[in-house]
Image (tube, rainbow, N blue to C red):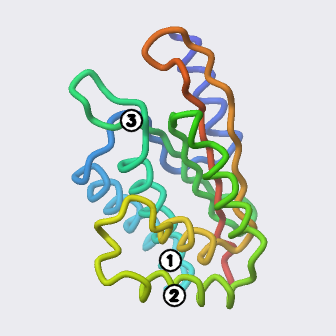
Amino acid sequence: MISNMRDLFNITNSNNADIIYAGAIWHESIEELSAILRRKMDTDNLPKRDCNAYFSIFVEMMSNMLKYSAAKTDSGVMKGSFILSYENGTYYAQCGNLMKTENKDTLKNRIDSLISMDKPALRKLYMKKLKEKSDIYKTDSAGLGLIEIAKCSSLPVEYEFSDFNDSGENSGMTLFTMRAAVTINS
């Protein structure tokens, strides 16, 4: 167990991680972590536009894990993990959670479609999705969160699906990870 902490320490230092979290995700935890992130961004004196973009990415990633994670605690609370880090003028947000393998192709196609769009096309799509349904927030797959992440990211969104071989409660699951970045414009 002690070597695990050493490995974690080495990973966090080599990746310039500011905030790492793994475990249960609920609305209150998002609010608390948001306050920590806001304080970090204030301390770093980020320009307001970049601060808002990074914060939006973080909130959307957390919200997606809250809604779609297939991993749950014993009490039924969704689980996921994320890392917020900084390197050479770019702030990175990375998240990971288990998902049902059967949903992998749908998510992959959606993200690939967004990655292929430029910023004006993403803004237009976002507005179109908002107008399509007056009650969009009651649907499960409006895709607004993914559009927001792609729209706010300075670099193309990166993602990966990893087979999660487990014969227990997590069988039929895939680990989904995503990374978005905000490059600071001084």
- Tell whether label 1 touches label 2 (CB within 8 Å): no
Residue that appears at 65% across and 33% down? 11
Q: Which residue carries the number 2 mark?
A: 128
How far separated are the C-alphas under marks 2 and 3? 31 Å
Q: Earlier in the sequence, mark 2 or mark 1?
A: 1
Q: CA distance from mark 2 to mark 1?
A: 25 Å
Residue drawn at the location 45% of the way across and 61% of the way down? 141
Dot 3, how many residues are within 10 Å of its Cα: few (below 14), some (14-19), or many (20+)? many
Mark 1 — residue? 51
Label 2 crowd (10 A; few <14 / some 14-19 / many >=20)? few
User: Quadrant location of residue 130?
Assistant: bottom left
Q: Which mark's residue is nearer the viewer, 2 or 3?
A: 2
Indicate which disc, 3 or 1, sits on the residue closer to the N terminus: 1
Quarter assignment of residue 74 = top left
Taking the spot 62% from the left edge, 42% from the top edge, the residue there is: 104
Residue closer to the observer: 123 or 14: 123
In the image, residue 134 above or below residue 166 = below
Q: Amino acid at mark 3?
A: Lys
| Residue 65 tag number | none
Q: Badge 1, how many Cα within 10 Å: few under 14, some, many 20+?
A: some
Rendered-image quadrant of the C terminus: bottom right
Q: Which residue is mark 3?
A: 79
